[in-house]
Amino acid sequence: MNIKEEQKKTTPCIFVVCMTTYAESKIYSEYEGYGEWIDCNQSAEKIFEEIQQMIDYSPSNSPEAGEWEIHDYDGWEGYEVKPNDSIENLANLAKQILNY
């Protein structure tokens, strides 16, 4: 579920980056990192599916493409999302925020 810009302000979301493409962008400057805003108001499984889909469509041709990291976030009501936060925890927290 790709998130629209206006949704970012009301729905807990994360910006996930393909680390291989991100590293390649620092070397080649062909792409400025590759990532996608993902709505976290869904199951962890659906979030992982979106992350995998983003990686599958990454412009990197490296067989090592697959590593990802959270580089930005929005809508978390003061919670500071970290690059290594658990997707399961973020999905649960997003539901709690929206049901509050």
Image: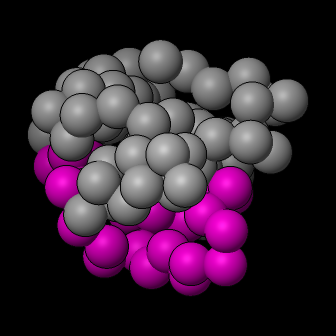
Q: Position of residue 93 (x, y in %)?
A: 38, 60
Q: Is residue 71 magenta?
A: yes
| Drawn side of residue 48 relative to residue 55, left or right | left
Q: Position of residue 65 (x, y in %)?
A: 24, 44
Q: Residue at x 50, y 74 (%)?
A: 81
| Drawn side of residue 79 relative to residue 43, left or right | right
Quadrant in which the C terminus appears: bottom right
Observer-nearest residue: 61 or 86?
86
- Whether residue 16 is visible here, answered yes or no, is no
Q: Residue furthest right?
A: 6
- Whether residue 77 is visible here, answered yes or no, is yes
- Please, which colouring scheme is shown? one colour
> What is the number of callouts on the image?
0
Q: Is residue 75 magenta?
A: yes
Q: Is residue 38 above or below residue 32?
A: above
Q: Is residue 54 above or below residue 27?
A: above
Quarter holding residue 80? bottom right
Q: Position of residue 72 (x, y in %)?
A: 62, 63
Q: Is residue 10 above or below residue 90?
A: above
What range of the chain is rendered magenta?
64-88
Q: Position of residue 82 (x, y in %)?
A: 45, 79
Q: Main secondary structure of the magenta part?
A: loop
Q: Residue at x 55, y 45 (%)?
A: 98
Observer-nearest residue: 6 or 32?
6
Q: Residue at x 56, y 78 (%)?
A: 79
